Image: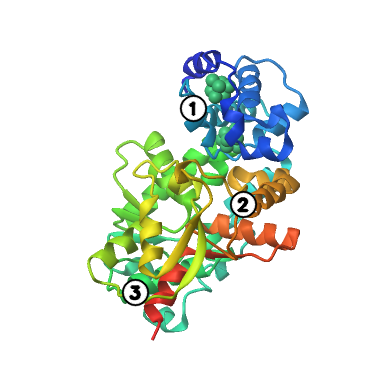
Amino acid sequence: MNEQKFLDDIDSCLDCKSCLEVCDTFKATNNELQSPNGRLIIAKKVLTNENISEEERFSLYTCTLCSACNLECPQAINIADIVHASKIELVKKNQGPFEIHEKIIKGIVENENSVGGKPEERLDWLPKEYKAIETFEKKESDTLLFFGCMSSFRVKESASAPYKILTHAGYDFKILENEPCCGEYVYSAGKLELAKDMFKNNVELFKKNGIKNIIVTCGGCLYAFDTVYPKYIKDYDIKVRHIVEVVHELVQAGKINLKSIDKTVTYHDPCRLGRKYKNGPSINEPRELLEMCGVEIKNISENPKKGPCCGAGSGIRGVDSNLVIKIGANLFNDIETKEIATSCPLCVFNFRYVNYKNQIDKDSKYITDYILESMEKK
Ligand code: SF4
Ligand code: SF4
């Protein structure tokens, strides 16, 4: 961590407050402590060993690390990375993360998932006919379809549909019977040493299984494998792609035929795919795929790269669920369609939660639901 660079960047802030306009936690609270600019001031205190108040500590942990502010800043300050670096500092000082994060991290260490799922139920989504033929790690393939906690346990159709689509297209891949957690939750909570151990163990597991390519369904796993792992693993050479990119390629190659399902939906860009993705951002592929399914797309913002966050990133659900509900409600207010499509199971899960809590009549779906429906249409 280059602390001096972070401090220099913080000092370059012009206090123009442009970043406030795009920060969903500020828009939901109107509290400058919960804004990018406010968080930079707190981060400076943390990085220079000044004490911070409980409210300031809370503010660092309610940042979703969505990076919308980074794009707005005329000084090109990487605000999200600075907030994350200050969380790492807080952990070193035994002032972070929160008890709820520790509880979830204990679950990750014991059961390899952040959502309290039972390891023996991880592959419950796998259709029976495939369970009989799936050979897991033993299969000769260097491509891993990786599902992560949310797809495996909470939004299971975002595991089963990608599996069915790739199988139908004759794509060569395998899955792991006992998939590990990618470690993104641990990393974003600031527990860097534990996260690094997880990254190292996972890469060893991938190497042992001959994995050279990973296809992910989740934005968090994408960010971890694509952007974070290369920072900490020497000679990391695994190619990482999101399922949307792979399916897009297969459709263009004529391996998947799509029929019109005639719908109108709003497409939400997950920040880890539409904004933070090192190879991307992947803005056009999901839209083109939906259009090829005969879906008319409505956008939330004029510039999709600057679109809002679902409100659930970086473990803020555990710290302030009311804030998450408010961010989600703000986003729903800007949506005219009943259906919201997105490419991250955490966004789907969060939208369903917000919908339930606010009693709004919206449906949230993972993008491959539309592809599968279109493929299977008679
Ligand atoms: S990363 Fe997102 S939530 Fe955090 S300060 Fe920036 S805009 Fe706000
Ligand atoms: S946009 Fe950048 S320069 Fe302006 S207040 Fe925010 S962090 Fe400072």
Q: Amino acid at mark 2?
A: Asp
First reached walking from the N terminus: tag 2 or tag 1: 1
- Relative image position of residue 103 (x, y in whole percent): 69, 48
> Which mark is drawn over residue 334?
2
> Which one is nearer the viewer's eye here, 209 or 354?
354
Q: Which residue is mark 1?
A: 78
Q: Position of residue 316 (x, y in %)?
A: 66, 44
Q: In percent of the image, x 32 and y 52: which residue is there?
A: 207
Q: Nearer the viewer, residue 84 or 377?
A: 377
Using the rendered image of the protein, determine whether residue 95 is visible from the camera's viewpoint.
Answer: no
Q: Which mark is residue 258?
A: 3
Amino acid residing under circle 3: Leu
Residue 248 screen position, x and y as percent: 32, 61
Pick the residue in front: 327 or 64: 327
Assign a secondary structure to mark 3.
loop
Mark 1 crowdedness (10 Å alpha carbons): few <14, some 14-19, many ≥20: some
Snapshot quadrant of residue 162: bottom left
Q: Is mark 2 within 8 Å of ligand 1?
A: no
Q: Disc 1 or disc 3, which is closer to the eye?
A: 3
- Quadrant of the image where one finds ligand 1: top right
Task: Please tell me whether mark 2 or mark 1 is closer to you in this view.
Answer: 2
Question: In this rendering, does residue 151 appear at all?
Answer: yes
Q: CA distance from mark 2 to mark 3?
A: 30 Å
The structure's colour scheme is rainbow
**SS for callout 2:** loop
Q: In the rendered structure, are the residues bearing label 2 and label 3 in contact, judged by CB atoms less than 8 Å apart? A: no
